[in-house]
Amino acid sequence: MANVRVEVSPSSSRPAEEEDSECGPEVCVLPTLSTDIDDDVLRGAPISTVMSSHARVFNTSSGSHEDYDKSVSTQRLDDFVSHDWASSRVEKFMSLCMVHNGQAASIASILAAIITHLLQSKLCFGILPYSRPYDPNIVDFTDYGLHYGIWAQLSCPVVFTFVYFYWQQLKGIVVRRSRLVFLDKLCIHQVDHHMKMKGIRQLAGFLNKSDRFVVFWSKRYFTRLWCLFELAGWLHQGRSMDSVVFVPLSYAVIVFMTVVFLSLMALVVTFGFALNNTVSMVLFAILFFAITPPFVPLLRNIIYHLRMLPKQIEDFTITDSHCHCCAVNHLDPHTGEQIPCDRALIYRTLTKWFPPSDSEAQAADVRLPPGEMADIDPRCLKTFDDTVRQLFEKFVLVRVGPTRVSYHHAVMGSLPYVWRAFDVAVAFGTFPDSTVVLLAFLRHFVISWATIPAVYKLIIQVATIQDRLIGKPQACWKNTLANISLSSMAVCIMMIVFAPVEVSDMYGMPPQVHLAVWLFQILLAVLVYNPFSCSRRQKPTQIVPMTD
């Protein structure tokens, strides 16, 4: 949520429906925030607008008339985007791409692979050449690898990246109907104080009209007052936790980096196997040392913060949250004028939304400052704290812990081997032994749907164990050693899991051996993802709404 304040200029007239507000000569402080929303206040921003210019809207929290005009009036919102403004714009953009464009990019890239297969295959159109340089001392044309196509591996990464970044903009041009989301900067006027006051007062109404609550989580999220109010509004209205999309920032970056790494690795295999071994090894080394420095620290960082999330939830209390007004001592840093307290406003609303379950409950260890918070019941804040702890510990943490990797995101990361499978299929009709080609074609799907997801999950589990043992050392040399050790363990895991597949192919094992190896890979993937666990079969939880 932007650093918004409920205030009105001296010349502004007070709306009739807010006669119960506590108003001074220059500042109007509302006692509570409403879950109702007026038709002229409810607005949504097309997701194509939010993501335009690589989500430039996230550069700063300050808005303008032009920003407000980018949103449109609506009766319903698809998503309510909850985030803190200090987090990285790049990570938010990548998260939006994964949530809104990932599926379309996967489908488009597979369609591109099919089309390039048809254009290369001699059994179909056969108009695209696919010859490549090779060393006759290493292989000759009886090697079926030289009969593979190349265009799916060259074009599909481009198609995937383009659709992954720009699908919503393309959809908005063609379909003229874009998903509408709430983003505070675009949907609440940040310049007109009267409109801004109405939008903030009815912020929970935006939540009430939203189908999903999308949380872009960072380590700061549970420390920001307005983020917690948005969460409180969702819980207060009795919405199912299954409609919460919890996206740890940096996770989407890791998924996309995996696609890039495997795409490059597939190209090295395709063009390097027919050259001398020295060239192939140099290409692999360059690729490995280019991707490891950014990938491993990023992976360790997100695992560290996700592992700290249960502790963050366990110790959660809204009284420890931070807000802009308190940070500047309730004085406008530009004009020096006094500004109202967001904290008092939100605390009053929570007092109304989360009454204590037991009228005789003690106030616990909640200390509030005197003055304008004298009328706030600390037990209500304690009730809200307990509600957040119970629900997030039971359900959200089960889904987003450091080892709770989504299988479909792991498969998305392994798409380059699906693309390569269609290049492999080009060998049908040109290579005399169709059984060998069929086994190679099916092997790539096993690698994409079982082997790579299993490797991905095992690396994350090893990284989590490492994090439990050493945490996040402050010394640079210790972090470097941790990165090197994790990289080494990742290479070992890849070699061990891939070894049966590569050996069965290298030595021309009979089909029965290939099938046994594939079955092992599939069972390994099932074992590490455990789709039959109790947590995955848990019924959706409906939160009991409080009285407004």
Image (cartoon, helix red, strand yellow):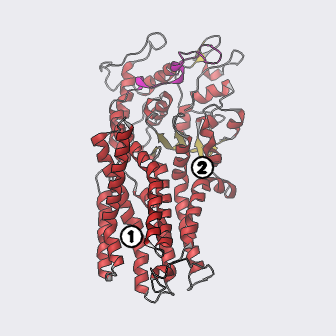
Q: Image height check: is 90 above or below 21?
A: below
Q: Image height check: is 422 above or below 17?
A: below
Measuring 65% from the left and 19% from the top, which residue is drawn there? Answer: 8
Prevailing SS of the magenta stretch: loop
Secondary structure of the residue carrying tag 2 is loop
Q: Nearer the viewer, residue 200 or 544?
A: 200
Where residue 179 is drawn, which disc sits there? 2
Measuring 59% from the left and 63% from the top, which residue is drawn there? Answer: 159
Q: Image height check: is 299 above or below 115?
A: above
Q: Label 2 amino acid?
A: Arg
Is-magenta flag for residue 440? no
User: Residue 180 location in percent, x, y?
Assistant: 60, 46
Q: In terms of image quadrants, where is residue 55?
A: top right
Distance, label 2 to label 1, CA atoms, is: 35 Å
> Is residue 531 in view from this perspective?
no
User: Residue 479 location in percent, x, y?
Assistant: 37, 41
Measuring 37% from the left and 47% from the top, which residue is drawn there? Answer: 483
Q: Earlier in the sequence, mark 2 or mark 1?
A: 2
The residue indicated by pointer 1 is 446
User: Residue 162 location in percent, x, y?
Assistant: 60, 58
Magenta-highlighted residues: 317-342
Secondary structure of the residue carrying tag 1 is helix
Q: Nearer the viewer, residue 16 or 332?
A: 332
Q: Residues within 10 Å of mark 1 (few under 14, many from 20)?
A: many
Residue 192 falls left or right of residue 500: right
- Tell me if label 2 and label 1 are in contact, CB under 8 Å: no
Is-magenta flag for residue 335? yes
> Is residue 183 in view from this perspective?
yes
User: Residue 193 location in percent, x, y?
Assistant: 67, 24
Q: Label 1 amino acid?
A: Val
